[in-house]
Image (spheres, rainbow, N blue to C red):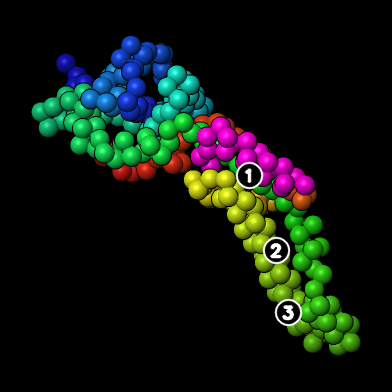
């Protein structure tokens, strides 16, 4: 008989979820396994079927979507959920079943889980991207007395010196552009920080496409009132000539220290 394995979606604290069920990945029945005031949303997983992540981008996307649907349903039903990353399995080992290991882990980490719950309770995660037009920022940063002086000097010099001055011009223009980008990045980040202290900067390349560049890419954790204030902040972005996109609401993945929650 294969060892018991549980697929873990997320966790709840201080809610009544004993009778909660829904269909999860591949039609598996998701239920709540409780330990005191804690509840883990899991489904029974046959170890020999698929221990690792599915192969193929389409299949991964399908299962990730189902994983998120379970968390979003729990978030809708209970107001809050502590999400665990896709593909989290709890196995039986050390002479204990997967259920026993999971309950033991919840008991040992009760304080951390309750603290995490206190942070995310009643809040939703949104992904925000603010875009700029590089040509516009280049035009703004190009209005500089030092650049004008270098351009004037180039016109008066011979080819050799003009070439060197041209390189100096490029370096100075790049510095001014970067300073302008940093100015607006700090400005918009500061506006969002005035609404919520829960902000995570997401790693991304600056360049997005030929039309616009990504200025700021963050995730924010907000309640209903704060979400309205974030919308006002983004309206100010538009007034200043910047575009933006908002994705969500999502379970608060970016604000859960999953490295500490899963051993």
Q: Which residue is mark 1?
A: 129
Q: CA distance from mark 2 to mark 3?
A: 18 Å
Q: Label 3's element?
A: helix
Q: Earlier in the sequence, mark 2 or mark 3?
A: 3
Q: Is residue 24 magenta?
A: no
Q: Is residue 233 magenta?
A: yes
* Residue 180: numbered disc: 2
Question: Local crowd at mark 2 within 10 Å, few (<14), some, or many (≥20)?
Answer: some
Point 58% across, 50% down: residue: 194
Please name whichever residue, 155 or 90, is drawn nearer the observer in this view of the structure.
90
Question: Which picture quadrant has residue 89?
Answer: top left
Q: Return the x and y of residue 207 as percentages of the image width and height.
A: 66, 52
Q: Determine contact: label 1, label 2, CB under 8 Å.
A: no
Question: Which picture quadrant has residue 174?
Answer: bottom right
Q: CA distance from mark 1 to mark 2?
A: 18 Å
Question: Looking at the picture, does residue 146 appear above or below residue 246?
Answer: below
241 left or right of 131 in image: right
Please name whichever residue, 25 or 11, is drawn nearer the observer in this view of the structure.
11
Front position among marks 2 and 3: 2
Point 23% across, 29% down: residue: 102
Q: Earlier in the sequence, mark 3 or mark 1?
A: 1
8 left or right of 95 in image: right
Q: Which residue is mark 3?
A: 168
Does the image show residue 158?
yes
């Amino acid at each position: 008989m294969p060892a018991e394995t549980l697929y873990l979606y997320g966790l709840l604290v201080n809610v009544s979820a004993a009778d909660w069920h829904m269909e999860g990945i591949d039609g598996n029945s998701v239920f709540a396994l409780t330990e005191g005031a804690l509840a883990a949303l899991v489904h029974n997983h046959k170890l020999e079927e698929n221990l690792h992540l599915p192969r193929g981008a389409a299949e991964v996307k399908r299962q990730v979507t189902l994983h998120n649907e379970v968390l979003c349903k729990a978030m809708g039903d209970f107001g809050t959920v502590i999400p665990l990353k896709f593909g989290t399995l709890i196995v039986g080992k050390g002479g204990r079943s997967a259920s026993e290991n999971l309950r033991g882990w919840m008991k040992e980490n009760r304080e951390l889980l309750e603290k995490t719950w206190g942070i995310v309770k009643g809040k939703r995660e949104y992904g925000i991207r603010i875009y700029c037009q590089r040509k516009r920022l280049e035009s703004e940063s190009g209005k500089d007395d030092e650049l004008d002086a270098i351009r004037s000097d180039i016109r008066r010099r011979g080819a050799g010196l003009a070439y060197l001055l041209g390189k100096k011009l490029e370096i100075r223009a790049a510095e001014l552009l970067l300073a302008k980008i940093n100015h607006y990045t700090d400005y918009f980040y500061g506006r969002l920080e005035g609404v919520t202290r829960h902000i995570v900067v997401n790693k991304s390349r600056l360049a997005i496409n030929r039309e616009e560049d990504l200025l700021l890419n963050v995730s924010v954790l907000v309640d209903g009132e704060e979400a309205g204030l974030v919308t006002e902040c983004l309206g100010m972005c538009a007034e200043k000539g910047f575009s933006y996109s908002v994705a969500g609401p999502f379970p608060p993945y970016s604000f859960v220290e999953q490295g500490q929650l899963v051993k």
